[in-house]
């Protein structure tokens, strides 16, 4: 089932989602929700989807970065982003247990803010502690683009959107991004739009 993803403006996107108990995770309802979220993410297509994005204030997100989503990127862009295929996985009640001092800046978009993108600074590497779809505790260590996706989705569970963290003057439509900035280094984009970088704010359990 493909679920509706309402755009920014819905209150649930600005609220702290509630944690799920292990017993809840194992219920048929949540297992079916995970399957529907997976299908919705793939249909969009996207690399992640959090429950608040479909109107549910639950600390649950699905993530998957398929090779086919990278076809339009040049090899240099893939390497700069450290973007590699990421198998489908589920994060429930996630906590950022550690994040690197090193940060990176890249354009991000969001299914809840359709048609737009902006440069966002994220930690290059993170360690996440969470439950998986079987309610088993897991630790995920990620770098590069996978780490960026995790941070983006965890933000959703805390009522934060990428537009809260973006370099404001880099905000643009996807059409303009593809027309003007697609093959331009991010550092040059920031220089041209005249905005200095800002460090990502700590939060969501990061240390």
Image (cartoon, helix red, strand yellow):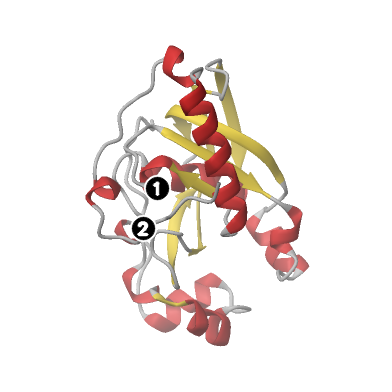
Q: Residues within 10 Å of mark 1 (few under 14, many from 20)?
A: some
> Quadrant of the rendered structure where residue 113 is?
bottom left
Label 1 element class: helix
Query: Which residue does the numbered mark 1 point to in the structure image?
Result: 54
Task: Residue 115: give x, y in percent of width and height.
Answer: 45, 73
At x 40%, y 47%, the residue is 54
At a point 53% along the width and 35% down the height, the residue shown is: 34
The image quadrant that residue 155 belongs to is top left
> Can the viewer see residue 115?
yes
State whether residue 51 is above or below residue 23.
Answer: below
Name the outermost residue toward the top: 23
Of label 1 and label 2, which has the lower sequence position?
Answer: 2
161 up-or-down from 88: above or below: below
User: Residue 124: in sight, yes or no?
Assistant: no
- What residue is rendered at 67% in x and 53% in y? 82
Q: Would you say the residues marked 1 and 2 are in contact, meaning their CB atoms lie under 8 Å apart? A: yes
Task: Identify which residue, 48 or 37, lies in the foreground.
Answer: 37
Q: Which mark is residue 6?
A: 2
Location of residue 91 in the rendering, given as x and y in whole percent from the top left corner:
51, 31
Q: Position of residue 184 (x, y in %)?
A: 59, 79
Q: Is residue 146 placed above or below 115 in the rendered structure?
A: above
């Amino acid at each position: 089932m493909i679920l509706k993803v309402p755009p920014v403006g819905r209150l649930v996107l600005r609220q702290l989602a509630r944690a799920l108990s292990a017993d809840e995770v194992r219920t048929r309802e949540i297992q079916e929700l995970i399957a529907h979220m997976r299908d919705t993410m793939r249909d969009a297509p996207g690399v992640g989807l959090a429950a608040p994005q479909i109107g549910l204030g639950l600390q649950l997100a699905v993530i998957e970065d398929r090779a086919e989503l990278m076809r339009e990127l040049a090899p240099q862009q893939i390497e700069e982003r450290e973007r590699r295929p990421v198998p489908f996985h589920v994060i429930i009640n996630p906590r950022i247990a550690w994040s690197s001092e090193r940060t990176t800046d890249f354009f991000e978009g969001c299914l809840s803010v359709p048609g737009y993108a902006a440069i966002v600074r994220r930690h290059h590497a993170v360690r996440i502690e969470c439950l998986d779809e079987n309610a088993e505790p897991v630790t995920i260590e990620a770098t590069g683009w996978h780490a960026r996706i995790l941070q983006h989705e965890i933000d959703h569970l805390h009522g934060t959107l990428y537009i809260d963290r973006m370099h404001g003057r880099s905000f643009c439509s996807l059409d303009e991004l593809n027309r003007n900035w697609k093959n331009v280094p991010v550092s040059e984009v920031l220089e041209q739009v005249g905005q200095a970088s800002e460090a990502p704010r700590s939060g969501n359990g990061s240390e």
